[in-house]
Amino acid sequence: MNRRDLLKGLAGVPFIGAYGYMFARKMVAEKTEEAGAFQKFVRSKILPSGAERSAQTSGGKKVRIGLVGFGIRGKQLMKSLGFMTPEDIDRMNDRQRKLFQDQPDLNIEITGVCDLYKPRLEEAARAGANNDREGSASFNRKPVKQYGRFEDLIGASDVDAVVIATSDHWHGPVAVMAANAGKHVYCEKALTQALEDVFSVREAVKNNRVVFQLGHQNRQAESNRMAAKVVQAGLLGSVNLVETTTNRNSPNGAWVYDIPEDAGPHNVDWQRFLRNTNTPFNKEHFFRWRLFWDYGTGLNGDLMTHEYDSINQMLNMGIPEIVTTTGGVYHWKDGREVPDVQQTVLDYPSRNFSLLYSASLASNFYRPKKVMGDEASIEVGATLKMFVDSESKMYEEYLNNEDILPNQPIALTQDMQAQLDAVSSATEKYFASRGLLYTSQGGRMVDTAHLHLAEWLHGIRTGAAVSCGIDEAFEEGITAMMATIAYREGRVVRWDGERVL
Amino acid sequence: METNKNGRILPLFILRIAVGWLFLHEGLYKLFTPGWTAQYYLAQSEGPLQGLFQWMISNEVITEIANYGVVILLIATGLLLMTGFLERVASAAGMVLLVFFYLSYPPFGEISDVMAEGNYLIVDKNMIMFLVLWVIWKMRPGKQWGLDRLMHGAWGKEQRA
Ligand SMILES: NC(=O)c1ccc[n+]([C@@H]2O[C@H](COP(=O)([O-])OP(=O)(O)OC[C@H]3O[C@@H](n4cnc5c(N)ncnc54)[C@H](O)[C@@H]3O)[C@@H](O)[C@H]2O)c1
């Protein structure tokens, strides 16, 4: 081997040296940039919330739960509680099954289920019995108790707590009766479909000191929690305008749900579905109740409540002083009563800010929530982005140093909802973008409703506070009803601190 | 004669260094990015390997193996190509990786390609790099410029002696 061999043999080595030098320089540069003064400032104000989520106990006796309403949502809540029919477990793909099997055990038992549609009632009873999350190959348990009347389920001595997922018009009566029987309540949003119910639910819950949680699982989403911190730390300056939205564009997103062929008076308890009305049997009303005022409140109760509650989570602003709602049935001319395009303005003159809710069920153009302050704004979607205002005083120094660029997005969270393969339909994607399906915890994907239910159960076991308790629920209920009244009566609706005027 | 050969080898040598550089940097960058995982890349893939990838990410151990595997392969391939050591092994390994990358997001004119950073139809950067590695595999510039020369030189001389 001669000198020339050696030189040529090692010809690549200097390039590796050059590369190594440049890579090291780049790394050092990025390190210093990463911990820029602006980031340091923001971080000093907010800490990642994962760490402080209190460790939840699920020890002790099993909490015995009765479920009222096993439709679309009731089924999802059962899954979030850890219960599915063996057939549904068979149907999941590996990934979904793993997500479900990994969901922590809540140390509960389903001791009764109630529904007005026979096939669903039977299905619920099979799901409730599946304690070990088994597929149909190994499952051979007796279905749990089935109730045709929620009064009987509530009265049962083996039910400690009730989960309510009926159509909106029954939330109030079921919740009141459960609270009066001393049973804890997890109630789906919207709190109610009638104004009086908002007051009576609050009274019953407070008088009986039961643990009440309203089904706004957005409270558990990382991007919402972080947004609340950012706002509460004053990082936006004074918030003067909030814009929230709903955009969907599909029959499913517009609540045109399938009506089962076999459904009829023989297996639907229509009389018990009606509350104060006398309508003859109508399948469409039963399965698409969201379209009619007798059972629901349209966008107000169904989707605005989620938006409202997530802003209430950030700003704690409570009930608006002035509410207006306009809109109409502009696209889905299918006989529905509730509007499909709607703008609601919630005004808070004494807090110097307005909240705009703007919705279309005939366009799925994506509009994330925007919370606007005089120093900075945030955009809350599956991830949380902050935009520093070019006129900001608080951040002037950072702007001048070009530490940050005005009105350019700065990502504050990296949520895992981008990873949407476990969920599929357009409506689900809409929900995921609002933080209503999954969130990340320690780098893992977690179902937010599971966390929300776990928080409720933790409250039952230890007396710890829940994040969407009766006070928050009352605010949600009154606000949604004000928006409904404003639309239906075509007028400005006010809150005087005690009553809706 | 020798100069002539040098002139022919030089571009190939530089090409090999450049591709090695790309591989090495991809690998090191991933290694130094906290929390980097192939999971998202695999999850979003819509190509013919979708089924395989979904299966891979459904298993934690396999996802971990994929994460380390990609990083180690990238770095090793990069270093070998730059030094010109075992360049045929390195080119082959690189080609296999590139086939995977290509098929994960095949540029077949789907609408989702608008997210790519350039405009491609069938031929993309992965394919070009694949072809480069094929040329290197064939022409073996490392026998002249690279550690392979020392190996071959040593053997060659022994055998001739
Ligand atoms: N938090 C969320 O993200 C979320 C999502 C979807 C729905 N929801 C809420 O969940 C509730 C249910 O919605 P859904 O889509 O499941 O409706 P659905 O029509 O699919 O199911 C409602 C079920 O309740 C039953 N029911 C109605 N009145 C009853 C009564 N008096 N006694 C016993 N059972 C009764 C019906 O038989 C039906 O099966 C609604 O209030 C809705 O707002 C919340």
Image (tube, coloured by chain):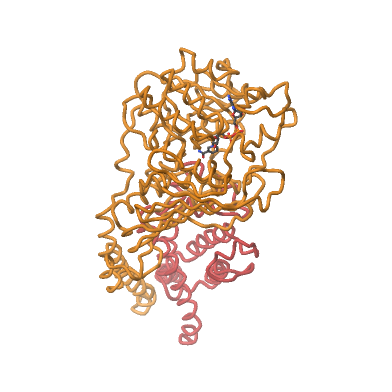
Chain colours: A orange, B red
**Residue B64 appears at what percent x and percent y?**
43, 46
In this rendering, would A53 be left or right of B11? left
In this rendering, is residue A176 above or below A478?
Answer: above
Q: Is residue A402 visible?
A: yes
Considering the image in quadrants, where does the C terminus of chain B appear?
bottom left
Rendering quadrant holding ligand 1 = top right
- In front of the other: B137 or A320: A320
Q: Residue at x 69, y 29 (%)?
A: A279
Q: Is residue B20 left or right of residue B121?
A: left
Q: Farthest residue in the front direction?
A: A501
Measured as percent of width and height from the top left, residue B60 is found at 45, 42
The residue sitting at the top extreme is: A157
Residue B56 seen in the current view: no
Q: Is residue A254 above or below residue B30?
A: above
Nearer to us in this view, A343 or A268: A343
| Closer-to-camera residue (A136/A72) | A72
Q: Position of residue A276 (x, y in %)?
A: 61, 27
- Give percent across and percent down for residue B89: 49, 61
Vertical order, A351 against A19 (above or below): above
Residue at 39% across / 56% down in the picture?
A353
Residue A13 sits above or below residue B44 on the image: below
